[in-house]
Image (cartoon, grey):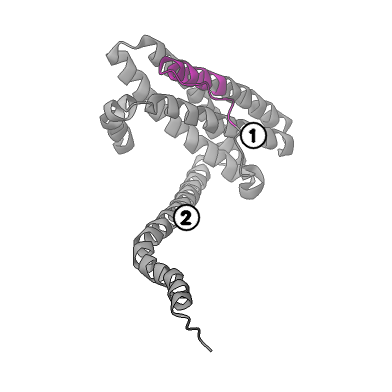
Amino acid sequence: MLRSLLTDILNPLVWNLPGNAAAKFYRFSFTEYSSVLDLTLAARLTPSNDRASQYLRHLQDELKHTHIFLNRCNKLRKERGRKPRSAPDADYENLFERLGEEQFLAFVHLGEKRGCMQFTSYARYFSKKGDTQTSSIFTTVLADETQHMAYTHDLLVELCGSRQKAKIALLKAQAWEARRSWMRNGKALTSKLFFVIVLSVYPLLLPYKLLQIARPAAQKESGWSSL
């Protein structure tokens, strides 16, 4: 509820920054294609033919979303006189192998649930603005995401053996997501902090470096050299 409220509040700012709408649609396209890769691996590795079929149907939807978002991104870029972006060169994290099928399903379910919340907010925002084209994009994708959220939960309950155990699996997946986000943000922060430190220290070291450069020239002019 809080996340949904925050999204609603930030929508006017996020979507109206120059160039940011196109960038967001490209990030959506990137995320969807990453899901295609993870689901392809899941379909290949799951021991269940039925689950493999459902993963394949899911990845076909995600591939469709990849193109929908990329096309919208490039249309917005064209309106701003920018060149189109190529298809995203996404990677994947081998989540099925790393987490196992149960935790993989929990992770995917959480992502689909989060996507449903965001796309509902976006569709409502653009509908109120009278931008039916953009609103319909999110409405179309939302229909698929809702189905994905439902089937992944059903499969998770089936694998876990009960709804209570499925809830525990979801809590574990949330903890894993939080830890992964913390580590990613920590690495990004460390990199930025190092850059700031270098910028701060460089002016202090510059006079010393200039002195080192000037000293040999002064020694040459005086004819003095060290032993």
Prevailing secondary structure of the magenta residues: helix
Q: What stretch is highlighted in magenta?
A: 66-88
Report x, y in % for residue 156.
57, 38
Residue 37: mark:
1
Q: Residue at x 45, y 55 (%)?
A: 191
Q: In which quarter of the image is residue 1?
A: top left
Magenta segment includes 32: no
Residue type at numbered disc 2: Lys
Q: Quick one: SS at disc 1? A: helix
* C-alpha gap between disc 2 and disc 1: 24 Å
Does 224 appear above or below 115?
A: below
Q: Which of 85 and 58 is in front in this view?
A: 85
Q: Does the magenta stretch include residue 79?
A: yes
Q: Pinpoint residue 97: horizontal percent, then vertical percent.
A: 67, 46
Is 220 rendered above or below residue 83?
Answer: below
Mark 2, residue position: 187
Depth check, mark 2 against mark 1: the one in front is: 2
Identified at 29% across, 35% down, the residue is 6
Left or right: 171, with 14 as reference point: right
Q: Quadrant of residue 10?
A: top left
